[in-house]
Amino acid sequence: MEYTFINVNPAIDEHIALIQLNRPKELNALNLELMGEIREALKILDDDDSVRAIIITGNERAFAAGADIKQMSGKSAIDMLQIDQFSTWDQIKKTKKPLIAAVSGFALGGGCELTMHCDMIIASETAQFGQPEIKIGVMPGAGGTQRLTKAIGKARAMEMVLTGKFITAEEALQAGLINKVVPVELYLEEAIKLARSVAQLSPVAVALAKEAVLASFNTTLDQGLHFERKNFYLCFASEDQTEGMEAFVEKRQPAFKGK
Ligand code: DAK
């Protein structure tokens, strides 16, 4: 598959794929083409059995400065409805493999929303997160009012959404939005390390566990616990469960096959 606005490496490390947004002059602003390419790449990598974790990154200056304002400017409500640009991102929600965002510089608007679509976020000390749509007369439209509020709570989300103020990587860490902050030269390496620690585990159990955690956003506690228990039992249908438990008993490292 040839891409124009992203670079894809299906094996940046063993079982780990990397998608790098690649519109550096525009701070990786998410035009329709780039968003379509992310969707395509994710679908291909999610279907590839050799891939066990996927990292999405940008460059040192910007993860992504949001949807492409120049492309949106002048559009009518009906144009926006018909283009329905972020609906293509439903693919991201469907991704079964763990997604890790490796963020440096700006993660704004749709860029911040993209990081929140990921399962874990590693940031460089220079990262800044924000939902500044309010400053251009609109509001977040790809999950910002919902995922941000669930991640950092109403007061902080309101402040970011209503003022457009950015928060630093350290503030994002304190607020519970991200997993770790590291010096700028290490953010990708740190994301790969995190991906490695997931990729060596049973892909079956990882996918079922991810699904159960995400279910907590849409269910009552009782429904969520019920869902969790079913997925737990389902793990026992896998060869990886047998291997994992036998390896423990035999005091050796397990060799998980994803079956
Ligand atoms: N779109 C297009 N171009 C952008 C851009 C963006 N979001 N952000 C930056 N650029 C371009 C700049 O125009 C500039 O291009 P040239 O003028 O050189 O041609 C280049 O990138 C470098 O930017 P600056 O010169 O501005 O760099 P600075 O370091 O001075 O400032 C900045 C960096 C990130 C603070 C600033 O560029 C900025 O404020 N950017 C806009 C950030 C923003 O407002 N992001 C939110 C965009 S709205 C939807 C759902 C959701 C959405 C849309 C639809 N539906 C459900 C349909 C999402 C909307 C958004 O994300």
Image: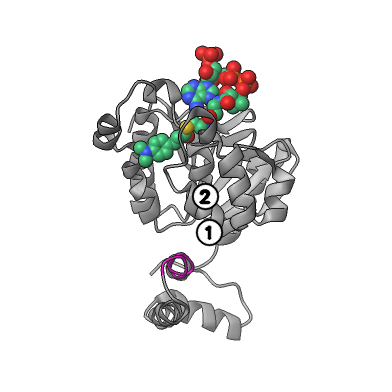
Q: Residue at x 38, y 45 (%)?
A: 42
76 over 227 or under it: above or below? above
Residue type (three-letter) at the residue carrying disc 1: Ala
Q: Which residues are magenta?
A: 211-218
Q: In the image as oriented, which residue stretches furthest toward the bottom?
A: 249
175 over 9 or under it: above or below? below
Q: Residue at x 42, y 44 (%)?
A: 142
Which corner quadrant holds the N terminus?
A: top left
134 or 225, nearer to the observer: 134
What element does badge 1 sit on? helix
User: Nearer the viewer's eye, disc 2 or disc 1?
Assistant: 2
The verdict on residue 232 being magenta is no
Residue type (three-letter) at the residue carrying disc 2: Met
229 or 7, nearer to the observer: 229
Asked if the residue at label 2 sits under 8 Å from ligand 1, the reply is no
What element does badge 2 sit on? helix
Which corner quadrant holds the C terminus?
A: bottom left
User: Residue 13: x percent and y percent?
Assistant: 55, 46
Label drawn at residue 116:
2
Magenta-drawn stretch, dominant element (helix, strand or loop): helix
Q: Is residue 51 left or right of residue 1?
A: right
